[in-house]
Image: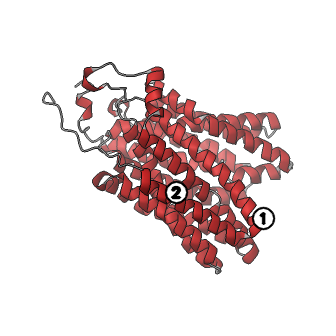
Amino acid sequence: AGAAGRRGEKPAPSLTSSRGLDAFTFFVANLQTGFGPFVAVYFTSQSWTQSDIGLVLTIGGLFSLFGQVPGGAFVDWVTSKRFVAALSVAIIGASAAGLALFPTFLIVALSMAAHSIASCTLTPAIAAISLGLVGHAGLGERLGRNARFSSIGNALAAAGMGACGYYLSSEAVFYVTAALAIPTLAALWFVRASEIDMVRPQASAGGTALGGWASLKLLLTNRALLCFAACITLFFVANAAMLPLVGSVLTVRASHTATILIAACIMAPQVVMALIAPAVGRAAQAYGRRPLLIIGFAALPIRGLLFAYTDAPELLVAVQVFDGISAAVLGVMVPLIVADCTRGTGRFNMALGAVGTAMGLGAAASTTLSGYMADHFGSHAAFIGLAGVALVALVLVVAIMPETRRAPALPDAGD
């Protein structure tokens, strides 16, 4: 079958490949958790100044923000997505080992930059492998499974690495992270390369497939993709600062239990996401993307308002259930809608990187905005302000976001 034949429904992958991808997403989440809050804890234990810690974190953040589009383009260009994923995992493992073995500023800065660059290729590589395995027709459910195993991996890794840091040492977290690269690569080996279709540019009506600047121009003029980028940027302006703001509120209201409550605030959305993400993927295939997207966006202003008017610290944890709903929806919808918008262009991963950059810019603006509002008007007003931005994002989704799901294509007569 040629390119036209591939527009039909792709056969389901083998159980070995499917379970291999499940395990791979689980271990990747384990691997990435080591570069979360544990980084600042480790640098502090090494007697680093806060300015040096902030500088290396900024270096990593900048590489992560501006590396997403070229990282996605690189994944589009390379034929073997498994090779990109394996290389990215190896670099992340080596970066963790570098942090543990050589905690000097130069090595740490290089390690943080290398980790960020590798993450910019690993995330789109996982999305590309998922799309290549199941095709567009099964992508929603596959992304739901990815989100489930990723959330389970995040939760278990946070608990396990926290225990390592408490009972052993802060650098033990990075030794464990480096060691996790081995089972991660082993899981990837079970994903059969022969079952991963190469997503290539396609042309309609027998024309020439677009490439280079022509395909880039097609992305820049894609109305649905531009609308989605605008909506998701506003969403992250409202969302990114909410949990840190909750952490500040909990520290003031219940300082003796703040650490436990913050940990519960992190765990609660992961549990909700693990439970509902596959159902979200199936619903997106059955009912379309737009209804699910509206639900995910609607959960955010509700969460902001509940945070603003909830006084009991324990109830703040319960409010985090709404974060799990939004996380499950966006964890599936972001790559799924991008795949819809870029179908036939061969630029899925580059567009995914562009949307990721928009999300990063929104998140960066969020912390600045919330900090200003909290300092000048108080945390109550900050939550109200973030909820207002979230409401604008919801209205924008309802007003301008089109449905991107296509009706299932019939196989060609020759199939």
Q: Residues within 10 Å of mark 1 (few under 14, many from 20)?
A: few
Name the residue: 47% across, 46% down. Answer: 228
Q: How many marks?
A: 2
Say the numbered circle drawn on residue 26: none
Q: Is residue 8 above or below residue 251?
A: above
Specify whether 218 is left or right of 354: left
Residue at the farthest front position: 399
Colouring scheme applied when the structure was drawn: secondary structure
- Can you identify the residue that label 2 sits on? 393
Viewer-nearest residue: 136 or 184? 136
Name the residue: 52% across, 47% down. Answer: 230
Which x, y percent locates residue 322? 51, 67
- Quadrant housing residue 111: top right
Q: Residues within 10 Å of mark 2 (few under 14, many from 20)?
A: many
- Can you identify the residue that label 1 sits on? 375
> Which amino acid, mark 2?
Ala
